[in-house]
Image (cartoon, rainbow, N blue to C red):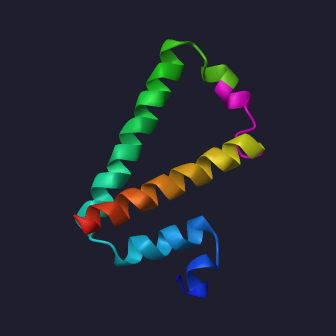
């Protein structure tokens, strides 16, 4: 059974705690994978000519973006933890 403290807080708060205690090399690898993915997305947006649409997109105010961001936090956290278990 999991301790109650595991369920307290947000995924973002747990992520920060994991980052503090994780192997810096693992964290660096996972974070740079996300930077590369972000860069690829931005290049795709530029290639499709959608820069202006992105500037107008309320990315900080939509439920879908908030949920996707939380999914990325959880996925990244899982990748860091899984890397430590190998």
x, y percentage for residue 17?
A: 47, 76
x, y percentage for residue 83?
A: 28, 61
Q: Quadrant of residue 62?
A: top right
Which residue is pictured at 33% across the width and 48% down the height? 32
Q: Is residue 63 above or below residue 8?
A: above
Which residue is pictured at 49% across the width and 28% down the height? 42
Q: Is residue 29 above or below residue 44?
A: below
- Please indicate whether residue 56 sits to the left or right of residue 22 in the image: right
Q: Is residue 59 above or below residue 73?
A: above
Does the magenta stretch mainly form a helix, a strand or a loop?
loop
In the rendered structure, which segment of residues is drawn in magenta? Answer: 54-61
In the image, farthest residue toward the front: 1
Residue 71 magenta:
no
Q: Quadrant of residue 21?
A: bottom left
- Please indicate whether residue 78 sits to the left or right of residue 59 in the image: left
Which residue is pictured at 52% across the width and 57% down the height? 74
Q: How many marks overall?
A: 0
| Residue closest to the eye, 52 or 59 | 59
x, y percentage for residue 75?
A: 47, 53
Quarter of the picture containing the C terminus is bottom left
x, y percentage for residue 41?
A: 48, 29
Which residue is pictured at 68% across the width and 42% down the height? 65
Q: Quadrant of residue 10?
A: bottom right
């Amino acid at each position: 059974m999991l301790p109650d403290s595991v369920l307290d807080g947000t995924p973002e708060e747990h992520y920060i705690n994991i980052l503090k205690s994780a192997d810096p090399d693992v964290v660096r690898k996972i974070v740079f994978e996300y930077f590369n993915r972000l860069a690829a997305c931005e290049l795709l947006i530029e290639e499709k000519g959608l820069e202006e649409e992105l500037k107008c997109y309320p990315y900080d105010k939509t439920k879908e973006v908030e949920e996707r961001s939380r999914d990325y936090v959880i996925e990244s956290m899982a990748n860091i933890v899984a890397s430590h278990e190998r």
